[in-house]
């Protein structure tokens, strides 16, 4: 089925008359079966002829990348992508040295690379990266990945978020849950943003119960708002997504849908940038339009820098510098740890205390407590103390794993207190609000 889909897609691209001089097949999760790789590259070579540069890009995540590369070369690929230690293997590409060894005795030339120079380069790269944290899962092969296609580039971003929120032990459960999510979602291409849709839905299924929530991106995908999936999504999931997101399924061209949305126009984001006092360059417009308020926060320098530093070892008894999350009396705090005379900026205690105190609390606590079901960050607060709400009204929105999670009123009543602020980090089961 997927082979036919790829063949049809390639033919459509060729028939469109688009100018090109090379074609690259990307297996972002490193899960392609080597036999299928051979069939696909052979098919592409016949369609493209001998003059077009044809290459394969894959990752070592599932442990089959070397076999896949050899199959691609045998089928007529002109090039493959490799990486260098210490950032090769695992969620990255196979190591240069590994592929040199795998192609010994063949006619394949990997660029006249010299062993002594590669060793020197990898040694120097290791020195340059020694102060940065490389999570262990970034360098490991997972036997679960072929059944739950998780791209290498997305995997470590997600595990780092789980590590920050103290949920890393649920990683295997989320990966296992992805199999059903991918199958019932129509096997959408497992690269950004669809790979993140899969992750978000699998995470929601693990944290809140199977299909109790629908991740917005995943729901819109199965409903057709990103185009047609290679296989039709499960009808039950389509119906559930329609109910949860209050959207009808569509077969309309997503470009036409986007053209009608003012918030997707260049004029809209140009004005937003001007209102924020930011330059209206093409790059800034793209960042703002693609990432919305997170893009604006990034351009204003208000988003956190996600570069991690610390010993390149996440296990064992050694002390390790870096960012950590601790929970004290049910309240989650982000802390920094540095070795020796590490440079950590310290804010005055009074400022920290003021920032930690929820500003939205008013009056006494209500009789009904509303708690977080997952660690995350407070993205938006939509109700205030004293507001009357109906059952199901959204009180606030958390963000966890790049997914928006609605916190809703469990019954009709009045908001008594809001116990968190926008941008607060919250722990699992932490008190968010009370109502009567």
Image (tube, grey):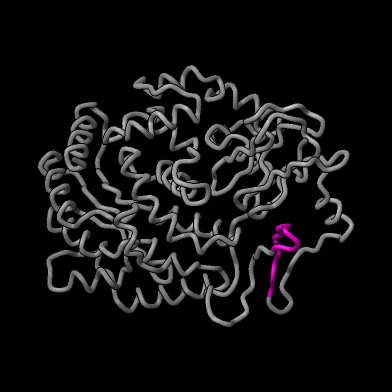
Q: Position of residue 421 (x, y in %)?
A: 76, 44
Q: Main secondary structure of the magenta part?
A: strand
> From which residue to which does the magenta span run?
327-338
Q: Quadrant of residue 269?
A: top right
Q: Position of residue 392 (x, y in %)?
A: 62, 31
Q: Position of residue 220 (x, y in %)?
A: 44, 31
> Which residue is found at the position 68% from the left and 77% from the top?
339
Above or below: residue 308 compared with residue 36: below
> Which residue is found at the position 45% from the left and 44% from the top?
201
Nearer-the-camera pick, 379 or 176: 176
> Which residue is found at the position 56% from the left and 24% from the top?
263
Q: Which quadrant of the rendered structure holds the C terminus?
A: top right
> Which residue is found at the position 35% from the left and 73% from the top?
118
Q: Position of residue 226 (x, y in %)?
A: 39, 30
Nearer-the-camera pick, 227 or 242: 242
The answer to whether residue 34 is left or right of residue 143 is: left
């Amino acid at each position: 089925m997927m082979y036919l889909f790829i063949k049809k897609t390639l033919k459509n691209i060729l028939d469109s008359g688009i100018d090109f001089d090379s074609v690259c097949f990307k297996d972002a999760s490193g899960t392609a079966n080597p036999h299928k790789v051979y069939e696909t590259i052979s098919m592409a070579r016949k369609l493209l002829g001998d003059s077009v540069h044809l290459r394969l890009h894959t990752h070592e995540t599932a442990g089959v990348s070397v076999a896949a590369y050899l199959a691609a070369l045998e089928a007529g690929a002109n090039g493959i992508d490799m990486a260098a230690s210490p950032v090769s293997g695992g969620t990255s590409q196979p190591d240069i040295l590994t592929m040199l060894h795998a192609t010994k005795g063949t006619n394949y030339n990997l660029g006249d690379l010299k062993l002594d120079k590669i060793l020197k380069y990898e040694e120097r790269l290791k020195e340059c990266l020694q102060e940065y944290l490389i999570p262990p899962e970034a360098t490991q092969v997972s036997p679960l990945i072929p059944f739950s296609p998780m791209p290498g580039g997305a995997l470590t971003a997600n595990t780092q978020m789980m590590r920050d929120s103290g949920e890393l032990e649920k990683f295997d459960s989320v990966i296992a849950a992805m199999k059903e999510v991918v199958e019932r979602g129509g096997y959408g291409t497992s690269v950004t943003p669809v790979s993140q849709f899969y992750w978000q839905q699998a995470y929601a299924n693990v944290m809140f119960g199977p299909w109790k929530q629908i991740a917005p991106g995943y729901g819109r995908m199965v409903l057709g708002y990103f185009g047609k999936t290679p296989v039709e999504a499960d009808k039950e999931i389509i119906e559930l997504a329609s109910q949860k997101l209050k959207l009808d399924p569509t077969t309309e061209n997503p470009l036409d849908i986007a053209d009608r949305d003012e918030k997707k126009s260049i004029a809209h984001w140009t004005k937003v940038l001007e209102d924020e006092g930011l330059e209206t360059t093409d790059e800034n417009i793209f960042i703002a339009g693609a990432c919305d308020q997170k893009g604006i926060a990034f351009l204003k320098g208000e988003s956190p820098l996600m570069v991690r530093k610390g010993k390149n070892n996440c296990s064992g008894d050694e002390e390790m510098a870096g960012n950590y999350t601790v929970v004290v009396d049910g309240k989650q705090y982000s802390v920094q740890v540095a070795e020796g005379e590490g440079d950590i900026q310290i804010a005055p205690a009074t400022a920290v205390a003021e920032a930690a105190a929820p500003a939205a609390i008013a009056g006494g606590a209500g009789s009904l407590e509303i708690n977080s079901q997952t660690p995350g960050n407070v993205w938006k607060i939509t109700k205030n103390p004293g507001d009357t709400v109906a059952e199901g009204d959204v009180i606030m929105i958390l963000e966890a794993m790049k997914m928006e999670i609605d916190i809703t009123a469990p019954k009709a009543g009045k908001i008594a207190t809001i116990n968190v602020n926008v941008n607060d980090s919250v722990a699992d089961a932490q008190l968010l609000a009370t109502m009567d």
